[in-house]
Amino acid sequence: MPANRRRGETEAVFDGRPRRLVLTLGALAELEAAFGVADLTALAERFESGRLSARDATLILGAGLRGAGEEIADVEVARLAHAEGAAGYVRAVADLLQATFGGAGEGAPGEANGPFPGTS
């Protein structure tokens, strides 16, 4: 069954297998704590900056995988391989954040596509 974007679900291929990701309320609370922010608005603003470290990607992808029901620790997430390398990780994170927080773009021509400029 394909990912349901209306529920904030996305799919990415790591280690050659498709995996579902979703930032549930619990996953978002996990990210608030990890990034030291007080609320969802501050979390969204943090991501809107467009700056992303490898550690940020690991935390976001890990929370998304766990939100979708996968039992995986961040140390294991850090070892996952993406066929497109760093660009693939960034695209997976941007897609997950777009599905979670939405935005004006939603892929519409001439509008922002997500929290990371240049990723679509």
Image (cartoon, rainbow, N blue to C red):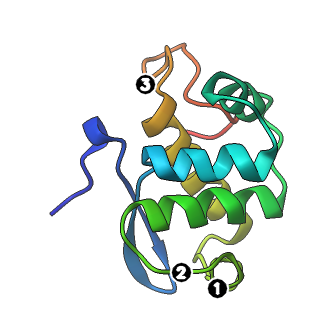
Q: Could you give the CA–CA distance between mark 1 and mark 3, rounded to whole angstroms?
A: 31 Å
In which quadrant of the rendered view does residue 86 lie? bottom right
Mark 1 — residue?
76
Q: Residue 50 carries which label?
A: none
Instruction: Residue at 59% x, 20% y: name it.
Output: 112
Depth order, front residue of 51/118:
51
Horizontal side, residue 100 vs residue 39: left or right: left
CB of mark 1 within 8 Å of CB of mark 2?
yes
Near mark 3 (Cα within 10 A), the count class, few <14, some 14-19 or many ≥20, is: some
Q: Which amino acid does label 3 sit on?
A: Glu
Instruction: Residue at 42% x, 48% y: name it.
Output: 24
Question: For the residues carrying marks 1 and 3, which lies nearer the camera in this image?
Answer: 1
Q: Could you give the CA–CA distance between mark 1 and mark 2, rounded to whole angstroms?
A: 6 Å
**In the rendering, at what x and y percent does residue 38 appear?**
74, 31
Label 1 residue SS: helix
Mark 3 — residue?
106
Q: How many marks?
A: 3
Mark 2 — residue?
72
